[in-house]
Image (cartoon, helix red, strand yellow):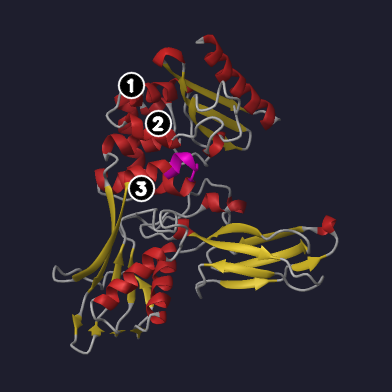
Amino acid sequence: MKLLTTSAALDYLGPDFEYKTIIKTNGRIATSGELNGDIIIKGSGDPNISGRFYGGNILAIPESWAQAVRNRGICAITGDIIADDTIFDRMYVNHDWPQNQLSAWYCAPSCGLSFNDNCVDITVIPDKKPGRVVTLLIEPGTSYFTIFNSCVSTTNKKEHTYSIHRKPDTNHLFVKGKFWVNASPEKTWVTVHNPALYLATVFKEILEKNGIAVHGNVRLIDESDSVKPDWEIITQTTSTMEQTVFVTNKQSQNFYAEQIIKTLGAQIKGRGTLEAGTEVIQEFMTKLGFQPEEYQIDDGCGLSKNNRLSPKMITTLLAYMSKHPHAKVLWDSLPASGTDGGLRRRMISPRYKNKIHAKTGYIAKTSALSGYIDASQGDILVFSILVNNFKNLSKVMKLQDDICQTLIDCYN
């Protein structure tokens, strides 16, 4: 599914398409430095507001916004920090995703204003004395979450089992179980509820740490916030579709794919919804020669069990994209055998390393590998291997690898 979603984005929007997140004010700035009004964070659906392109510094972007506010001479804000996420709807999570896994990073919600992949990073650090509660390193450090930690250290390695989950529709995080005293710290990622408020809360806290008083609250934009043309733009942050496609495929990042499909809906259909994005995907499929009754699209990332595509559809897509003006962008985004992404530990021998550029895919009882094979003498093959209803994933992955390696052998 990510192959289809990212290819449609390159075809309809292009790699140079820019997401723009704008920080602006709706009030007068007094000579004293007091802003008599609000600060608005206007989202564009950008999935890249994180530390991913900033040396791992999760707070790099909101800290740059706070610096821009200071540079404008603002030392106090009488109003609110308003999160404008209206580029997308507020259907955060697909109803066909596994409901018992919504705390996991791969089920991160989609939102018009997102931050840190709409997750909080939690590192569990054992206490060396058994029975004591473990230490939690929370990144970013913010009051947006309420943590209930009852996980304790244990000297019995066999008891090492713990869980971290978020109560649905809240930001109450529960850490339970036992953690072996000699285990290394373990990092996990837990999804957030209402991502736009998450970012706005972190931004408000950074402003206050920088000595900028915020007298109002953090809230979502509503109908009472009429947009005026004289609102002053303080700063903006941009990222590109090329960056977004690269992360989507190389890291198999579901959250990114969901942001892309809603971006297609917003930009092409004027509606930032899954339904509008699916309409664009359907038009793309028609361009490839397939009619809507031949397939089924239920999300942008492939996590839903209700997606239905055939290998012929995927190879037709890949062949089309191989001749596309942005073919190299898609190619560069795909994991390479024995090198990176989902193929870094597969087909690692020198004969096959970097010869297969392909997207993996997995949900329960379904495994996929589709992409390009760099054959000899400049020939490029497209392939798609979809396997359903199996019992042993490792055997299926070996079968996929054997087919790819056989194809390379036949061309050498």
The answer to whether 391 is drawn above or below residue 15 in the figure is above
Q: Is residue 248 left or right of residue 234?
A: right
What is the x, y in percent for residue 348? Answer: 60, 28
Disc 3 residue type (three-letter): Lys
Residue 344 belongs to magenta span = no
Which of the pair 401/54 is nearer the observer? 54
Q: How crowded is mark 1: few (under 14 residues within 10 Å), some or many (20 or more)?
A: few
- The circle drawn on residue 289 is 1
Q: Residue furthest left?
A: 230
Q: Is mark 2 on a helix, strand or loop?
A: helix
Q: What stretch is highlighted in magenta?
A: 247-253
- Element at label 1: loop
> Which structural element holds mark 3?
helix
- Is 251 within the magenta? yes
In the depicted structure, whether residue 7 falls above or below residue 33:
above
Q: Tell me the kind of residue under disc 2.
A: Trp
Q: Work out how far the residue at label 2 is from the one at label 3, CA to CA, in angstroms.
A: 23 Å
Residue drawn at the location 40% of the way across and 64% of the way down: 60
Task: Determine contact: label 3, label 1, CB under 8 Å.
Answer: no
Q: What residue is disc 3 on?
A: 262
Residue at figure coordinates x 78%, y 61% from the top left? 182
Q: Position of residue 241 (x, y in %)?
A: 33, 45
The part of the image, by quadrant, that contains residue 351 is top right
Q: In which quarter of the image is the N terminus?
A: top left
Q: Which residue is denoted by mark 2 in the rendering?
A: 331
Asked if residue 126 lies left or right of residue 14, the reply is right
Local packing at callout 2 (Cα closer than 10 Å; few below 14, some 14-19, many 20+) is some
Instruction: Place residue 76 in its image quadrant.
Output: bottom left
Residue type (three-letter) at the residue carrying disc 1: Gly
